[in-house]
Image (cartoon, helix red, strand yellow):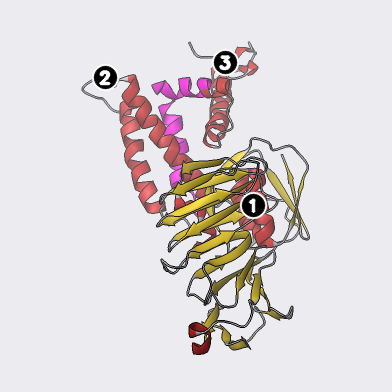
Amino acid sequence: MKKALSPAWNLNRMADNPKEIIFMENRQELIKLFKRYLAKECSAEEEETFLSFLEDKAHAPLFRELIEEELQAEVDPEFKELPKVKAELQRVKSNLIREMGEQEVDRPVSKNQLWLKVAAVLVLCAGVVFFTTHTKKRELLADVAPGGNKATLILADGSKVLLDSAVKGAVIQQSGVMVTKTADGQLVYTIQEHVVHGHPKKMLTNTVSTPRGGQYQVNLPDGTRVWLNAASELKFPLSFAGLKERRVSLTGEAYFEVKKNATQPFIVASDRQVVQVLGTHFNVNSYKDDASTKTTLLEGAVKVRSLTGANPDEAILKPGQQARIGEASAVINVANVDPSAEIAWKKGQFFFENEPIENIMKAVSRWYDVDIVYKDDFAGKTVWGSVTRYGNVSKVLSILELTGGIHFKIEGRRIIVHK
């Protein structure tokens, strides 16, 4: 037995055509539930109600119409997988329509088989909904441009070089090390011969710091490549020659491609952990205002050791694994993740995989150099989807609004978040 969608279903009203009124209420309620289901906002009762109506073949024409709307929607060109998704959606949709009674079938379809088709359509449809671009009236009084290649190089003597305004070529020469800026904005350290075979007279440290709204790539003295995300800082020796280990310190987020050297391990130290590798690719997310520090391995192997708590923990990661360390606990939690999602920022994308809205807005705040103000409580609100980091902030906010239940207003360099 189907549950009532709303009190309106039980009203005995006088009208020229009561059946038509009830049908229209039914249709509007189903459309609302369809959108809420895709946005993962249905309560358990609403979900049960929606799925019971979805199973009824009498409603197949309406669901076909809703799916057709998603197939015809204008799509964000950044969503490269759309043709593949649309083709699969069309195929599954056709099967669903046939099996829900739009065409005659030779044998009845089992409930389990039908639900597999239904689930496939809804999951695919949710993906298309999230990546579609709709023109909407929004409270955008201004817009904010994305970040770019911005960083400051702090030399051993404390002097600073603004890398985004520095011209291509030699930036500085210090203690036998030449620092140059390439045409595409990378910072490259080249060690001269007498430093390689000798020992530097004293340990000199350089720091590369990115502001909010900045990112930068650094090629370290040993050939290791580092991509710094916004609001991050990397400290490292001017030369690793003569040292037992290659130790750097990180605040914020960075992706490392470490040059192999079996005799000189590479170590990344941050507030809550130490990561040790010989040569590998991995991402470290260690912002001080985040609840946890995350290390994600893409290639090779790394050893992670916690620095918090009375009894430090250790873990060795395999490719595709992520280590998480909380603020107060020394325990390292290891889980399998999609590494490409974790380094989407390096490829110019925001990628949200069931991510709390508060975490997403922190990333938006760092990249667009804006402040976030919450007018409502969004605890438990999560989002799936992807959008380019190189569009204005309004584009990101539009995508987030498509998930439903959330609205944004831009006031200068503040983003107001409310229901």
Q: Name the residue carrying label 1.
A: 397
Q: Which residues are magenta?
A: 48-77
**x, y (%) of residue 321?**
45, 47
Left or right relative to 310: residue 274:
left
Q: Is 408 or 24 nearer to us in this picture? A: 408
**x, y (%) of residue 233?**
65, 65
Secondary structure state at the residue bearing disc 2: loop
Counting other residues with Cα less than 10 Å from the Cα at mark 1, is it few (<14), some (14-19), or many (20 or more)? many
Q: Is residue 377 visible?
A: yes
Secondary structure state at the residue bearing disc 1: helix
Q: Is residue 190 above or below residue 412?
A: below
Q: Is residue 348 visible?
A: no
Amino acid on which the number 1 mark rests in the picture: Leu
> Which of pointers 2 and 3 lies earlier in the amino acid sequence?
3
Mark in front: 1 vs 2: 1
At 34% from the left edge and 20% from the top edge, which residue is drawn? 111
Q: Is 3 or 21 nearer to us in this picture? A: 3
| The label number, if any, that marks residue 4 in the structure image | 3
| Membership of 405 in magenta stretch | no
Amino acid on which the number 2 mark rests in the picture: Pro
At 74% from the left edge and 61% from the top edge, which residue is drawn? 142
Q: Are marks 1 and 3 in contact (CB under 8 Å)?
A: no
Amino acid on which the number 3 mark rests in the picture: Ala
Q: Is 214 or 224 nearer to us in this picture? A: 224
At 49% from the left edge and 75% from the top edge, which residue is drawn? 222
Q: Is residue 319 above or below residue 245?
A: above
> Which of pointers 1 and 3 lies earlier in the amino acid sequence?
3
Q: Name the residue carrying label 2.
A: 108
Disc 1 versus disc 2: distance between alpha carbons? 45 Å
**x, y (%) of residue 288?**
69, 53
